[in-house]
Image: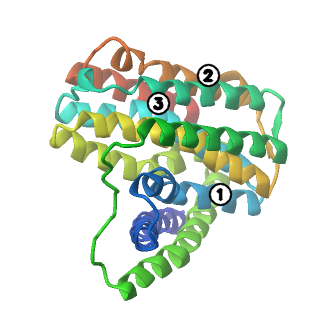
Amino acid sequence: MTVDFLMVAIGLLILIFAGDALVKGAVNLALRLGIPALVVSLTVVAFGTSAPELLVSVQAILNGAPGLALGNVVGSNTANVLLVLGIPALIATLHTSGCDTRRDFFYMLGATVLFIGLCLTGELVWWNGLILLAVLGGVLVATFLSSRGEKVEVEGAQPGLPGWRVTVYLLIGLIGLPLGANLLVNGATSIARSVGVSETVIGLTLVAVGTSLPELATTVMAAIRRHADVALGNVIGSNLFNLLGIMGVAVLVGPVPVEATFLSKDLWVMLAATLMLVPFVFWGRDITRLWGVALSALYCGYLWWALA
């Protein structure tokens, strides 16, 4: 099983570096083609940063482990709130009271409720994917219209980047992402069989935490630099894309049965974690170290519950 954990670790590393390279290459190519910075930020950057999770979910479905794909998304959304906001708050208070993320939070909450509603049918199929992607398109259009005229700094933009480096970044991303996803999924499914648990549980725990590492790293740096808006916005945006974009594309590849454990436990934990953002979004509360301890402890409790 050591080899399987090594495969998972190598796969995660490849996914992280390949995803970063793809974002840099795609962003700079888009800007070279004259696409507005706001459009690049809302589309190229958003999809690019979610590329590792997308490739993992698609690869899981192709490998006959759809539970791992669903577990990855649901587990990542829970981890993003409890772990990705909890650990940075242990380092420094996130002053979210000065951030206005109410609109984006409503989008995320609506996406969460919609996703749970579709899951209650017992199986996510292609037309569910079309609904999720259509809603995502509507959110992007609404965000674009409300953000026009604002100055936008595009993540990964490097003015004057030589064309050959743009090409290299794109090749690293396009080659590395499927390679990393394949290693991660194969290692994770093998671990699941070895320890006698389902791929779903491994997706909710090991894979979910692994694919949330980039968001965790970003949020830790935001906490250190006192950029609470970046931290909270990163979590909300990531969760929104996980539900609408990643699962929207994934179920077009193949159907995803929703196991009973999701309907009785995991989906509602994800919804409860989402609602835990209310004090920070609407009530002007900062995410203090005490909140960091509480959120991190809740996530540890959830992991124990899921693995038990």
Q: Which numbered circle lies on residue 189? A: 1
Alpha carbons under labels 1 and 3: distance apart: 34 Å
Residue holding disc 2: 268
User: Measured along the vertical axis of the image, is residue 118 above or below residue 175?
Assistant: above
Residue 198 picture location, percent across and down: 69, 45
| Mark with earlier residue (2, 3) | 3
Q: Which numbered circle lies on residue 104? A: 3
Q: Secondary structure at mark 1?
A: helix
Residue 31 sits in quarter: bottom left
Give the position of the C terminus as an image quadrant.
top right
Alpha carbons under labels 2 and 1: distance apart: 25 Å
User: Measured along the vertical axis of the image, is residue 200 above or below residue 15?
Assistant: above
Crowd rating for badge 3 (residues with CA inside 10 Å; few <14, some 14–19, many 20+): some
Crowd rating for badge 1 (residues with CA inside 10 Å; few <14, some 14–19, many 20+): many
Camera sees residue 201: no
The one nearer the camera, 299 or 194, is 299
The residue shown at (39%, 57%) is: 37
The residue shown at (46%, 73%) is: 33
Residue 34 picture location, percent across and down: 44, 68
Q: As drawn, is 43 to the left or to the right of 88?
A: right
Residue 299 picture location, percent across and down: 43, 30
Residues at circles 1 and 3 in contact by the CB criterion of under 8 Å: no
